[in-house]
Image (tube, helix red, strand yellow):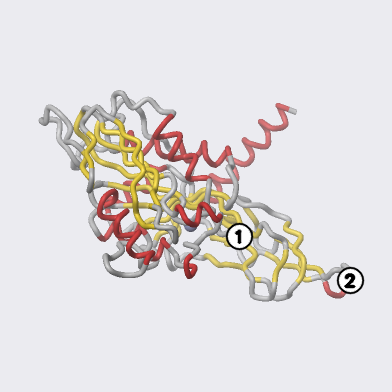
């Protein structure tokens, strides 16, 4: 929610015109947009590896916000979020600047792999990057210096790792007041607090005074329309909160829970190898003792069925999609809920169920 006491981010209203957006090799003037293919590396053939970047520079002053996706090359949902914001939305009254990077890890995207194919480097552990270092760090450096550092805020879109799925949630360093404001503005039901691993874009950008959150949504290798639409609502809400689209309004998700380090949460892991029959999906509310899944052998022998129960009442934030496990493989990410959140969530589910009954 906008608060009159909140300091302005980026430009101020006294400026008659927005600044030009500049990067190494070019500029985008106020009131202009540019589709840029920006070289960040070279292939074995000596050809440029270029990432697509769309810069939309509003006429009116305001914050500069980056939207990035596919730092992991097979995580596709965010690509569509960034493309729709960049190319389907009307930004004629934009106050500020949008820097849209739908595909950061181009080599991984071409191979449909999470990591950079060369030595399996993780681009999202290579920020802020460094000149004269590894190929991954050089790529990260070119992205970071040209398109991240000039920004005031950032949204980095991810999905679960291949074979698993996440409900839409935000990961954010809630100790930083601007990151906290950004996380709330995105209006997801679930926020997982923490600064994130070293080398991740959100942690390093935040450390470089560009408060940034990660949005996790769904699974790799898919466009999941309902999640994409939900994320677009979050982006619109952020642009309203920070004044880029001053006529739009901030969205309230209905209920919200922030999960801190010492809160009840766990990755339930398989204690037997086998084939998983998952009873509950992402976003499900499960009661303590409720059966989440069973693990069986190829013969479905009764004696060998392993039943996995919820150790506490909570919400399934992430869950296995590929139904095969070795002992120790993750089955689901379960987070505990406060009594208030539990009540709000139950109420929402009851409303959903009765409207479904009315439709059928
Ligand atoms: Zn990712």
Q: Return the residue nearer the eye: 341 or 92.
A: 92
Reply above or below: 9 against 143. above
Reply above or below: 66 against 266. above
Q: Return the residue nearer the eye: 260 or 247.
A: 247
**Quadrant location, the N terminus:** top left
- Residue 123 pos. (x, y %): 41, 61
- Residue 336 pos. (x, y %): 54, 60
* Crowdedness near tag 1: few (<14), some (14–19) or many (≥20) residues, C-alpha within 10 Å: some
Residue 62's disc is: none
Distance (Cα) linking label 2 and label 1: 29 Å
**Residue that label 1 marks:** 313
Horizontal side of 329 relative to 257 (left or right) equals right
Image quarter of residue 317? bottom right
* Crowdedness near tag 2: few (<14), some (14–19) or many (≥20) residues, C-alpha within 10 Å: few
Reply above or below: 36 against 274. above
**Residue that label 2 marks:** 301
Residue drawn where x is 40% and y is 50% of the image: 156
- Residue 328 pos. (x, y %): 64, 75
């Amino acid at each position: 929610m906008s608060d009159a006491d909140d300091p302005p981010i980026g430009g101020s209203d006294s400026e008659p015109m927005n600044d030009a957006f500049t990067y190494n090799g070019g500029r985008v003037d106020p009131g202009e947009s540019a589709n840029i293919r920006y070289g960040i590396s070279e292939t074995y053939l000596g050809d440029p590896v270029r990432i697509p970047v769309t810069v939309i520079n509003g006429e009116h002053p305001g914050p500069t916000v980056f939207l990035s996706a596919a730092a992991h090359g097979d995580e596709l949902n965010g690509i569509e979020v960034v493309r729709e914001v960049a190319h389907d939305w009307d930004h004629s009254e934009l106050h500020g600047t949008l820097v849209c990077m739908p595909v950061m890890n181009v080599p991984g995207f071409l191979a449909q792999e999470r990591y950079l194919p060369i030595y399996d480097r993780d681009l999202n552990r290579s920020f802020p990057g460094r000149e004269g270092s590894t190929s991954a760090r050089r790529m990260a450096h070119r992205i970071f210096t040209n398109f991240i550092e000039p920004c005031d805020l950032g949204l980095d879109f991810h999905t679960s790792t291949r074979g698993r799925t996440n409900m839409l949630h935000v990961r954010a360093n809630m100790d930083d007041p601007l990151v906290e404001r950004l996380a709330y503005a995105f209006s997801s039901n679930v926020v997982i607090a923490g600064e994130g691993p070293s080398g991740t874009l959100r942690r390093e950008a935040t450390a470089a005074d560009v408060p940034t959150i990660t949005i996790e949504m769904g699974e790799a290798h898919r466009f999941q329309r309902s999640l994409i639409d939900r994320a677009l609502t979050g982006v619109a809400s952020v642009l309203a909160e920070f004044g880029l689209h001053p006529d739009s309004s901030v969205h309230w998700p209905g209920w919200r829970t922030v999960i801190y380090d010492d809160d009840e949460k766990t990755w339930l892991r398989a204690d037997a190898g086998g084939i998983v029959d998952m009873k509950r999906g992402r976003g499900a509310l499960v009661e303590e003792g409720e059966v989440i899944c069973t693990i069986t052998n190829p013969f479905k022998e009764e004696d060998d069925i392993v039943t996995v129960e919820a150790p506490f009442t909570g919400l399934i934030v992430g869950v296995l999609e590929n139904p095969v496990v070795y002992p120790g493989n993750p089955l689901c990410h379960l987070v505990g809920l406060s009594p208030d959140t539990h009540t709000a969530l139950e109420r929402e589910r009851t409303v959903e169920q009765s409207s479904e009954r009315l439709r059928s």
